[in-house]
């Protein structure tokens, strides 16, 4: 086993390895692996195969510049999605403590304490005041 690891690390010298895009591809492959084959079928199978091949190609690639460009582009595109997912996840985690509203003027997300009824809220970033209702 030690010999294998030594050979493997020698083999990986000068190769790209993992980055955020690689983890994204792996997450995609794992999640789509749970999709029922009968519904998504052969098209998804081909897409998964291509994603897997591309991920492996990138992993062993020696062209660092091109791989880093791909990763930068991915982060630029996926950044806002990741932020929104994190926000929505936070809403679920804090459902017993807070309610979330967006400022109608600047779209800043506001975290409000749970006080039932109608309230006037002032946005901390643009100082716009607006009415909101917390139902439960
Ligand atoms: Zn605002």
Image: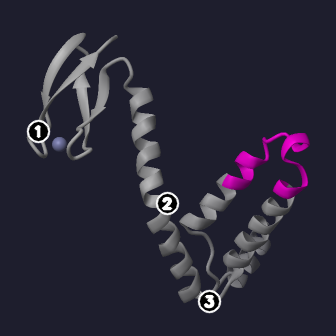
Q: Extreme left residue here? A: 127
Q: Residue at x 39, y 30 (%)?
A: 91
Q: Nearest to the eye among marks 1 and 3: give it.
A: 1
Residue beneath label 1, please? 128
Viewer-proximal residue, 134 or 5?
Answer: 134
Are circles 1 and 2 on residues that touch, CB within 8 Å? no
The secondary element bearing badge 2 is classed as helix
**Left or right: 46 as drawn, with respect to 114:** right
Location of residue 83 with respect to 35 vertically, above or below = below
Q: Dividing the picture into quarters, in which one does residue 65 lie?
A: bottom right
Which mark is on residue 78? 2
Instruction: Name the residue at 84% across, 46% down.
Output: 40
Q: Where is residue 17 in the image (x, y as percent from the top left)?
A: 63, 74
The quadrant in which residue 51 appears is: bottom right
* Cα distance in 3D space between marks 2 and 3: 23 Å
Residue drawn where x is 61% and y is 60% of the image:
23
Q: In this view, does 43 lie to the left or right of 90?
A: right
Q: What residue is shown at x 31% (from left), y 20% (from top)?
A: 97
Mark 1 C-beta closer than 8 Å to ligand 1:
yes
């Amino acid at each position: 086993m030690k010999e294998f690891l030594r050979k493997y690390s020698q083999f990986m010298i000068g190769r790209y390895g993992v980055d955020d895009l690689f983890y994204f591809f792996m997450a995609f492959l794992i999640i789509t692996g749970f999709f029922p084959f009968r519904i998504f079928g052969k098209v998804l199978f081909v897409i998964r195969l291509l994603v897997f091949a591309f991920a492996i190609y990138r992993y062993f690639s020696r062209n660092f510049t091109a791989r880093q460009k791909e990763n930068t582009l991915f982060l630029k595109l996926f950044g806002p999605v990741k932020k929104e997912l994190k926000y929505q996840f936070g809403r679920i985690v804090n459902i017993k403590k807070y309610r979330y509203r967006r400022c109608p003027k600047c779209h800043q997300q506001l975290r409000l304490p749970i006080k039932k009824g109608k309230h006037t809220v002032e946005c901390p970033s643009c100082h716009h005041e607006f009415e909101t209702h917390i139902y439960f």
